Image: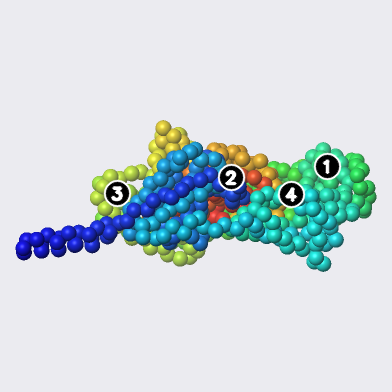
Amino acid sequence: MRNLGYMLLSILFSLAVLPLAGQEMKVKSFEHRTTDITGKVKPRYDNNEQACALIRVEVALSDVKFEGMVMGEPIEKTGEYFVYVPTLASSLKIKAEGYLPLEYVFPEKLIGKHTYGMRILLPGVPDAGELPRPTAQYVVMQVEPKNAMVVIDNMPRQLDENGMLFLELSLGEHSYQVLASGYRTQQGTFPLIDTEKTQLNLKLAPATGWLELSSVPADGVQVLIDGNGVGTTPCRLQLSGGEHMLQLLKPGYLSHTEKISVVDGQTLKLQRSLKINSSEVVLKAANPKAEIWVSGQKVGVGTWAGPLDAGTYSVTSRCAGYEDMIDPIEVRPDGERTFNLSEQVPVYGMLKVASQPMGADIYLDGRKIGQQTPYADSRVLIGRHTLWVVKQGYNTELREVEIKRGEMTNLVVKMTAGESRLPTQSPATASPATPATTTPATTTAEASGEVYKVGDYYNRGNLRGIVFWVDASGRHGKILSMAEEKFTWDQPGMNRLCGASNLKDGTQNQTKGESLSAPSFLYCKSQGVEWYMPSKEELMQIFRAKAKINATLKKMNQKFLSQWYWSSTERDSDQAWCMEFYGGQSYPKMKDVAQPVRPIANF
């Protein structure tokens, strides 16, 4: 009898514990909702730029997790989740606390931009049936001019005194047409989905004529209409009827201004010649490594030759470790002139280097100093320098040091046992009093036979950065700048295709972006002629090397990689590709959003 009691207690205990192991979720239904256009109106794209399918998962739970080929974060709505998957996906795994994982195999091949519905039943929760979905939604229109006539689905509608229309219509696509006297008719379609209303801001374009404009010189002349830049010659412009002020500008030429009259529906053809107002000049810096700046803009290094408009200029010679030297020059439109710029004055600071153990060799900017640690020098050019501390039987230590005018910089390096490595530049013995930057280093990895790997610090010639990709030889590859800034991809409000569509080679995109003065591309160009903005696939190469890059940046006390970066690859006239560096996913973003930009260069 006692044994029977124990058996009953064991059975009851087992029944009580069993639900704790997890309850089972079941898929009640899965359907292709052909009339639901939410997936078309709010699309997402996979890594191959293919449109995803949208699955609306109805489940009475919060904090549900979805696994498999899920693109981006699911969107939680009331009683349902929006989950985007590629068309190649064959199943979806669903997890929730207290329930067994559910993996559902789709009964059909998914279609991009189409919407599917999935209903999930929970044990102990009565089936309330499908979520009630509205059959209608609102469209809100703001129209200019306010007296325009609006036709929706072939039925006239009345705007209020503010040019607004608020109307409830059935879900799906609807057609519209906006008409007004003196304006061009605008027509199109708009969608209505169950989760939000549709807002349309419609501004009719005035009835216009055309201007066909050519010039001498034949191209590159900037065209302004009524004070606004509209492009360069040759060009065909659509203008509102009436009088306009035309202005033509080109560096090296006198400007041209005149009043023109445009007639609606007609083409005005003009050709205008500009008069030369410049001279070919040659600017020679005393220091061949000095940057040459003309009126605040960098134009070259060492020597620069090119045209300058007639006038007076301030020319600055600029080089790390030297005082800026400013030379005023006057340019006249009467032939070529050569200007020899004044010599710069070096500026020194002091450096002390000690190591544990002592007796280590010192390389400053790739050149071997003639003494071992401890070492002191009172004549080191100011600015940033790369310092290598090398001793046989110890790991080589790399440091970036900042030398300041008249100040002593002290550096103590603790070395650890390991394998020593020489700097990437060919060392040459130098006197301690000789500035380490006076002799240029070899400019290519191939010349010295140096082999690189991902994560190495590259410092040759004017290029400094972190290696993120190398070829099979290890002598050629790509480096990432240690500097970054936030810029918009293009100038706000331009909404234009730049032609920067290359997915693999950012150098081609860089040329396109520079030609249109896009801010992010101009920033990369400002770092030097070798630097450019990475393409979409080059950003992926950087992401794959993220851990090694950040390890080197940490060692050099530099800023880690950010969460988001612009690529140089545009998607359309409004958006370009951006990559998030947490998961390595690429998403299109509006071009007028400021995001971090890090230039790259080839070596």
Q: Secondary structure at mark 2?
A: loop
**Residue 589 locus on image (x, y percent):** 59, 52
State the residue in front, 66 or 480.
66
Task: Check disc 1 and report the residue beneath it.
Answer: 236
Tell me how far mark 2 sits from mark 3, CA to CA: 65 Å
- Please indicate whether residue 254 sits to the left or right of residue 497 in the image: right
First in sequence: mark 1 vs mark 3: 1
Tell me how far mark 2 sits from mark 4, CA to CA: 19 Å
First in sequence: mark 1 vs mark 4: 4
Residue at horizontal 44%, vertical 57%?
Answer: 127
Q: Which mark is residue 175?
A: 4
Closer to the observer: label 4 or label 3? 4
Tell me how far mark 1 sits from mark 2, CA to CA: 44 Å
First in sequence: mark 1 vs mark 2: 2
Closer to the observer: label 2 or label 4? 2
Task: Check disc 3 and report the residue beneath it.
Answer: 395
Q: Secondary structure at mark 4?
A: strand
Residue 333 visible somewhere in the drawing: no
Whether residues under marks 1 and 3 lie with C-beta atoms below 8 angstroms apart, the answer is: no
Closer to the observer: label 1 or label 2? 2
Task: Check disc 2 and report the residue beneath it.
Answer: 34
Q: Amino acid at mark 4?
A: Ser
- Please indicate whether residue 12 sits to the left or right of residue 58 in the image: left
Tell me how far mark 1 sits from mark 4, CA to CA: 32 Å
Residue at the limit of the structure toward the front, as seen here: 1
Q: Amino acid at mark 1?
A: Arg
**Residue 103 locus on image (x, y percent):** 38, 46
Closer to the observer: label 1 or label 4? 4
State the residue in front, 51 or 115.
115
In the image, residue 360 sits, relative to residue 110, either above or below, namely below
- Please indicate whether residue 229 sits to the left or right of residue 117 in the image: right
